[in-house]
Amino acid sequence: MNELFYLIIEFFKTGLFAVGGGLATVPFLYEIGEKYGWFTIDTLSMMIAVSESTPGPMGVNMATYVGYDIAGIVGALAATLSLVAPSIIVISIIAVYLQQFKKAKIVQAIFNGLKPAVVAFIASATISLFMSVFFIEQSFAFEFINWKSIALFCFLYFVSLKYKNLHPIILIIISLMIGIIFRF
């Protein structure tokens, strides 16, 4: 019961403060993993991969995954509802007043102030994921570089540049096949 309470609190906070979409939830999830020991950075990387490749918003998928892993179906529902509740509350309040205030300088200043914060959150998450995917033991020593991941990244990056209209699902399927064949 105690874990369910913390699940609700943490995902409500994440939903309230993770402005900018699914990737903005990653720093919060990283902190949750460290604080409660519910998952590691490697598990977080896997959750992001699965959440990105399944239908639905990434943050919701990740909340559902963590909730289910911690407290089963009740945990999945609690974490998911806790994550989306702040958005529903805030957007309901904003919808009433936005038409009146959307041209107000203070509202524009608030949104302009939030943009750099969102970029910083996403950059922080990206750097953490970069380290966990490309370096073993999060060390910069040459022998700890994950060469397979770097090679796959470069290959997929150049394929996506060359074939700009290639659907992301194709790249995901290619990644899955390469991961299976080369035992990532």
Image (cartoon, rainbow, N blue to C red):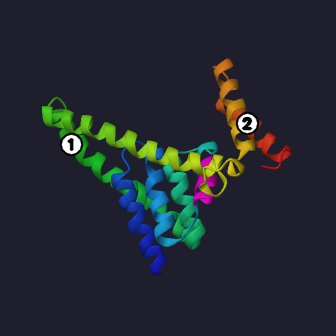
Mark with earlier residue (2, 1): 1
Residue depicted at x 68% and y 25%: 158
In the foreground, 116 or 76:
116
Which residue, given by chain and number where applicable, does mark 1 sit on?
A: 96
What is the distance, in whole Å, between disc 2 and disc 1 at their CAs?
51 Å
Residue depicted at x 15% and y 35%: 101
Q: Secondary structure at mark 1?
A: helix
Q: Is residue 61 above or below residue 163?
A: below
| Relative image position of residue 100 (x, y in whole percent) | 14, 34
Range covered by the magenta-colored residues = 41-49
Q: Amino acid at mark 2?
A: Ala
Residue 151, labelled with which disc? 2
Residue depicted at x 58% and y 56%: 44
Sort mark 1 into few (<14), some (14-19) or many (20+) by Cα contacts within 10 Å.
Answer: few
Q: Amino acid at mark 1?
A: Val
Give the number of the mark in front: 2 or 1.
Answer: 2
Do the CB atoms of the residues marked 2 and 1 lie less than 8 Å apart? Answer: no
Q: Quadrant of residue 104?
A: top left
In the foreground, 147 or 100:
147
